Image (cartoon, helix red, strand yellow):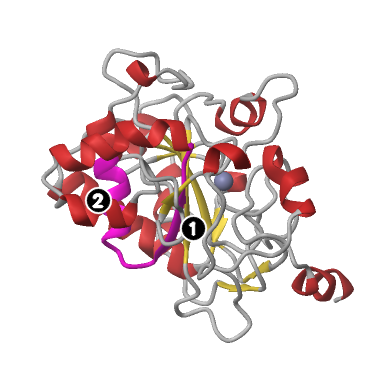
């Protein structure tokens, strides 16, 4: 597979995600998790055109997927329940090879329809490893049952069925990347792209991020540095010890050497959760 071999040899920055950051990443030397990175503000490339164009594209929300009861209440729906139940199991075997920026997904598993937990923005772009699907289920179980968050949460792109190149993303190629829109403040239309701080329910968004962090599988949460303050405050409000918060957040220090929650351009209205290589086998690479 020449494409994969080429990709595995790529010395791209492991932090790259959406297309907005591609030019700067490709001109930089490789960055290791152990090496301090530059201050995030200086890492932001010059803005050309609409800086939020990528997020508008990947987070545009259409009609809500209907629940089983709702579907069965519609004319001509007889028999649909069988198809829905058949899609609700998560098979083993889906695994990641290579890096998030250059790898692929083998035996991809589709994130199941589960409207009580989350909304899939596009089922055709919702494929991942078995481990990723299980981790999402665990995080949303915690969010809904333990933390009591009831608001709709929209999951954007995961990967394509076999992974690989997936524009406008630079990563999302190996089934270990999850885009999740920030939880909307109450009363907003569900299609809102939350680019304003007042449009976000920060406490619910922190509960969401915390639910993923506690799975132990998260290597990074990519999120715009300038917006991290809101999430940081919400973490403190939730009772997380300040030293723990400092360990997780790049904000306010800007030294992102060890922080899990770190800046990446193009991540203002959504967080990008990346999972580790646990259970993926020796060919899984990159954090
Ligand atoms: Zn992403």
The answer to whether 61 is drawn above or below residue 212 in the figure is above
Position of the C terminus, as image quadrant, is: bottom right
Residue identifier under label 2:
245
Which span is picked out in magenta? 206-224
Residue 211 belongs to the span the image colors magenta: yes
Work out whether residue 53 or residue 166 is closer to the camera in this orientation and state it. Answer: 53
Q: Is residue 51 visible?
A: yes
Residue 82 is situated, as x and y percent measured from the top left of the image, at 42, 51
Q: Is residue 125 left or right of residue 82?
A: right
Residue 137 is situated, as x and y percent measured from the top left of the image, at 33, 57
Kindly identify the residue that appears in the image at 46 percent across and 54 percent down.
256
- For the residues labelled 1 and 2, the Cα–Cα distance comes to 19 Å
Residue at the far left: name it. 239
At mark 1, the secondary structure is strand
Kindly identify the residue that appears in the image at 53 percent across and 24 percent down.
62
Residue 149 is situated, as x and y percent measured from the top left of the image, at 20, 37
Mark 1 neighbour density, 10 Å: few (under 14) some (14–19) many (20 or more): many
The answer to whether 247 is drawn above or below residue 120 in the figure is below
Residue identifier under label 1:
274
């Amino acid at each position: 597979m020449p494409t994969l071999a080429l990709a595995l040899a790529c010395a791209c920055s492991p932090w790259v995600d959406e297309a907005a950051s591609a030019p700067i990443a490709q001109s930089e030397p490789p960055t290791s998790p152990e090496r301090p990175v530059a201050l995030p503000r200086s890492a932001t490339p010059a803005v050309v055109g609409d800086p939020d164009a990528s997020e508008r594209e990947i987070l545009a929300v259409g009609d809500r997927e209907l629940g089983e009861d709702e579907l069965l209440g519609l004319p001509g729906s007889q028999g649909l329940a069988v198809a829905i139940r058949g899609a609700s199991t998560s098979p083993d075997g889906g695994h990641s090879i290579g890096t998030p920026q250059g790898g692929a997904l083998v035996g991809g598993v589709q994130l199941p329809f589960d409207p009580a937990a989350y909304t899939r923005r596009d089922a055709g772009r919702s494929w991942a490893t078995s481990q990723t699907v299980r981790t999402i289920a665990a995080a949303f179980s915690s969010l809904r049952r333990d933390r009591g968050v009831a608001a709709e949460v929209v999951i954007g792109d995961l990967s394509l069925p076999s992974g690989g190149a997936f524009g406008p993303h630079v990563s999302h190629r190996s089934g270990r990347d999850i885009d999740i829109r920030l939880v909307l403040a109450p009363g907003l239309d569900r299609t809102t792209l939350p680019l304003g701080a007042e449009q976000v329910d920060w406490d619910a968004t922190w509960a969401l991020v915390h639910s993923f962090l506690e799975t132990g599988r998260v290597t990074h949460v990519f999120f715009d540095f300038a917006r991290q303050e809101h999430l940081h405050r919400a973490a403190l409000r939730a009772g997380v010890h300040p030293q723990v918060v400092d360990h997780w957040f790049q904000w306010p220090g800007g030294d992102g050497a060890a922080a899990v929650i770190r800046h990446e351009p193009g991540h203002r209205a959504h967080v990008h959760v990346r999972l580790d290589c646990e259970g993926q086998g020796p060919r899984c690479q990159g954090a």
